[in-house]
Image (cartoon, helix red, strand yellow):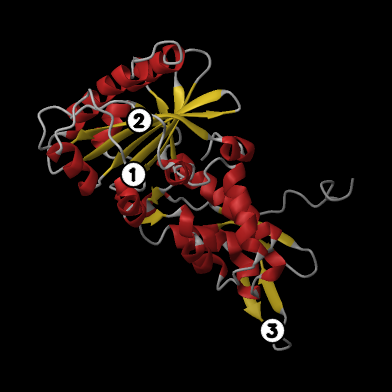
């Protein structure tokens, strides 16, 4: 889910950038100077914009990442070394969370972005062996400013080396902020150490995300019911619950077609169902969110409904389904057995 409007995205520019080398083979990160002027702007903006379709988090209280970014936002324009010095603290904190296990060597990038005078921040962990080797072999220090010109080709060819990215909007109230995260190591959520470094929590729980997805699917079905095969028209909502409750699976918003096909049947790439579903997930605030759908967490509503061509509607609990008989002339006979009839009156809900 994005917190940027389309206009904000179009107006994004990189105001400041810096990177440091981090990884398990280092006792401390290799710290460098701010890159002036900024380099490979189009490439990095494209990478940053890709995070807009990520998972939405919010800062927890006492987040060190938030604290440092607020210092940068408030002081970096007036104090020449503020951006560089605070980014070093941020990289060192990242290193302390990142240095255990089999974590790889890479570049810790920090960007300050501006759109219509509002500042945003992006943090990228980029695994690029060529850049790491260049920094370490050349023994660059924090007194030197690295150049990335010679690595343009490797950045472009190895775009998948962007392991983690967080796009951050600080709350103007002075406390808190929103964070969109894309994490290649845990697409449906966020890896433990990156979560610990950012000190964030997910805005929507998996249950909330799943319920919002179901609502988006229901609205999509009702809007385009007449386009679907008769068998799905009859029980489309039931089909939604049936498919989602079969087994656990990871919902991928970048390729929702397998899920939609399993519910609605084969869809043409120009089907309005695809656009409606995309719009509804955006309206529900889950556009771009990846998450795990737990089959045992899908609970089908107990009430069911039968509606006939004559506008007869029968509502019942699933365990009390009326008997349906096939007649010789093709019609169907519905038999309801009841202890007593409690209402036999004008339906005011349809006659007002």
Q: Position of residue 69 (x, y in %)?
A: 39, 20
Residue 262 at x, y = what percent? 49, 68
Q: 50 or 16, which lies in front? A: 16
Q: CA distance from mark 1 to mark 2?
A: 11 Å
**Residue 23 appears at what percent x and percent y?**
17, 37
**Residue ID for mark 3:** 327
- Which of the numbered marks, if any, corresponds to residue 206? none
Mark 3 to mark 2 CA distance (whole Å)? 80 Å
- Between circles 1 and 3, the one closer to the viewer is 1
Q: Helix or strand or loop: what does disc 1 sit on?
A: helix
Q: Residues within 10 Å of mark 2 (few under 14, many from 20)?
A: some
Residue 271 falls left or right of residue 154: right
Q: CA distance from mark 1 to mark 3?
A: 79 Å
| Label 3 crowd bin: few (<14), some (14–19), many (20+), radius 10 Å | few
Asked whether, in this view, residue 60 is left or right of residue 352, the answer is left
Q: Which residue is mark 1?
A: 149
Estimate the x, y position of residue 151 in percent, counting from the top left. 30, 48
Is residue 260 visible in the rendered structure shown here?
yes
Res. 338 in view:
no
Identify the residue at the far bottom of this view.
Answer: 328
Tag 1–tag 3 contact (CB < 8 Å): no
Label of residue 35 in the image: 2
Disc 3 secondary structure class: loop
Q: Earlier in the sequence, mark 3 or mark 2?
A: 2
Rendered view: 127 above or below 27: below
* Callout 1 crowding tier (Cα within 10 Å): few <14, some 14–19, many ≥20: few
């Amino acid at each position: 889910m994005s917190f940027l409007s389309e206009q904000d995205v179009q107006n994004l520019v990189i105001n400041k950038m810096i990177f440091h080398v981090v990884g398990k083979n280092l006792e401390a990160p290799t710290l460098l100077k701010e890159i002036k002027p900024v380099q490979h702007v189009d490439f990095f903006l494209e990478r940053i914009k890709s995070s807009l379709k990520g998972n939405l988090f919010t800062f927890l209280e006492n987040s060190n990442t938030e604290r440092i970014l607020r210092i940068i936002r408030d002081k970096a324009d007036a104090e020449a070394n503020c951006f560089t010095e605070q980014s070093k603290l941020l990289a060192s904190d990242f290193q302390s969370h990142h240095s255990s296990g089999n974590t790889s060597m890479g570049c810790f990038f920090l960007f300050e972005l501006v759109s219509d005078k509002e500042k945003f921040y992006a943090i990228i962990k980029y695994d690029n062996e060529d850049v790491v080797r260049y920094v370490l072999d050349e023994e660059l220090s924090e007194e030197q400013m690295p150049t990335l010109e010679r690595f343009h080709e490797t950045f472009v060819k190895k775009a998948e080396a962007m392991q983690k990215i967080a796009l951050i909007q600080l709350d103007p109230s002075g406390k808190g902020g929103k964070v969109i995260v894309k994490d290649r190591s845990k697409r449906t959520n966020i890896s433990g150490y990156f979560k610990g470094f950012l000190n964030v929590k997910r805005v929507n729980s998996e249950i909330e995300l799943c319920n919002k997805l179901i609502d988006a699917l229901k609205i999509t079905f009702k809007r385009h019911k007449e386009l679907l095969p008769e068998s799905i028209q009859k029980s489309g909502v039931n089909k939604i619950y049936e498919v989602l409750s079969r087994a656990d699976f990871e919902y991928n918003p970048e390729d929702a077609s397998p899920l939609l096909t399993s519910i609605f049947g084969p869809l043409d790439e120009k089907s309005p169902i695809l656009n409606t579903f995309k719009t509804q997930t955006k309206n529900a605030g889950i556009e771009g969110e990846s998450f795990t759908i737990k089959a045992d967490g899908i609970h089908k509503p107990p009430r069911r409904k039968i509606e006939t061509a004559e506008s007869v509607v029968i509502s019942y609990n699933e365990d009390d389904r009326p008997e349906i008989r096939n007649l010789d002339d093709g019609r169907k006979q519905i038999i309801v057995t009841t202890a007593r009839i409690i209402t036999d009156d004008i339906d005011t809900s349809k006659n007002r």
